[in-house]
Image (cartoon, grey):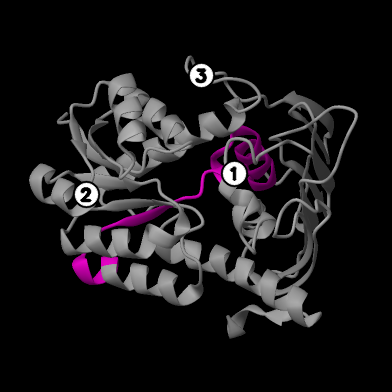
Amino acid sequence: MTELRGALIGCGFFAVNQMHAWRDIAGAGITAICDRDPARLAAVGDQFGIAARYADAEAMLAAEKPDFVDIATTVASHRPLVELAARHRVPVICQKPFAAGMADARAMVAACEAAGVPLMVHENFRWQSPIQAVRAAIDSGAIGTPFFGRISFRSAYDVFSGQPYLAEGKRFIVEDLGIHSLDIARFLLGDVTRLTARLRRVNPAIRGEDVATMLLDHENGTTSIVDCSYATKLAVEPFPETLVEIDGSEGSIRLAQGYHMTVTGRDGTRHLDVSPRLLPWASRPWHNIQESVAAIQQHWIDCLRVGRESATSGHDNLKTLALVEAAYQGAASGEPVDLAEI
C-alpha cells in the first residue's frame, strides 16, 4: 500500500501530539512542515526528522504537492489556509475551533466542495475511547431509549501555561473546550433544535468566560445539560476527563472519574474499566486526548483511501459550531436560541 504524504501547517503546542500520532498511523506520514516561527519549525523538524521545512504555506503546497494537509494553527488563520488548500486541490484537516464564525465556516466548506476535496475538522473528543464506550453502550440497547443526558467537564487545571493565548480572547471556554462537549452531546444524543446558555467569568486574570452551563433540546426529544468549568477545584483533579450521565427508558449509563463506566439495564448492572491506552509517546493526564488524536487521524486516512466522508467532516462540524454560536448568542440575550436561526 502506497503511503499517503501529508504536510503539516503549524508547529505549536498541540501539533506535537499530531506529529507523534502521524508516525503511528498505518498508510500515511508527514513529509513536510510549515511555520512562520523559525524556532518552532526547527524544533519540530529536528524532533521528527522532517527535512522539508517551509515558512510559507503556499510555497510548501506548490513544491511538495502532498496527498493531504493538516492545519494545526489558531482559528484566525483557518479560512485562508483551508481556501489555499482547496485552490491546490489538497484534502485538508483543520484544527478546531473550525472558524471564528458561521460565515467563515460555510465559506470553507463551500470552497472544498467546489474543489472536490475532502475536509475534516480535528474534533477529537468524540474519538476518546471512554466516549466511544458510552456510544457503544447506547447502541447496544442496554438502557432502552435515552431521554436525558449530561456531559460534564469541570476542572481547575492550568491550561494557560501551555497555551497563554487562551487567557487573552473575549471568548474562552465555550469556544475552546465547550465545543468538544457540545460535539459529544451531538454524537451521543443526536442533533439539537434549541439551546439555552448561561456563561460567567470567575478567574479575574482572563478576558473570556471560564464557566458555561447549557441546556440542549435534541431533535429526538432528549434533553441534555452540557456544563464546563475551568474554575472548579476538586479533591482529585479530573483533567482532562469528560464525565457522562445518560438516562434511558430501561436503564442508565454513568461514566465517572477514573474512567469507570457503570451500565444498568434490563439484565442488571455492569461495571467497566474504559481507561484509554497509554501510547508509547503519551503522558498522563493527557493520554486520553493523545489516544483520540491517533484515532481520528487514522479515521481520516481510512476515509481518504476509500473516498468516504469522515465522521467530523466540515459539513458535519457546521452543526457543532452552530451550537457554539448559539451559546454565545443565548448568553448575551438571556433567551433560548433556535438552531434553525443559526
Crowd class of label 2 (few under 14; some 14 to 19; many from 20; radius 10 Å): few
For the residues bearing labels 1 and 3, Cβ distance under 8 angstroms: no
Q: Name the residue under label 3.
A: 279
Residue at 18% of width from left, 64% of height from top? Answer: 87
Between the C-alphas of marks 2 and 3, the distance is 32 Å
Q: Which of marks 1 and 3 is nearer the N terminus?
A: 1
Q: What residue type is labelled 3?
A: Leu
Determine whether, in the image, residue 132 is placed left or right of residue 208: left
Q: Which mark is residue 56?
A: 2
Give the extent of the magenta segment. Answer: 112-139
Q: Which mark is residue 164?
A: 1
| Callout 2 secondary element | loop
- Which quadrant would residue 193 be assigned to in this image? bottom right
Q: Is residue 325 left or right of residue 310?
A: right
Q: In which quarter of the image is the C terminus?
A: bottom right
Q: How crowded is mark 1: few (under 14 residues within 10 Å), some or many (20 or more)?
A: few
Which circle's residue, 2 or 3, is located before the other in the chain?
2
The local secondary structure at tag 3 comes to loop
Amino acid marked by disc 2: Asp
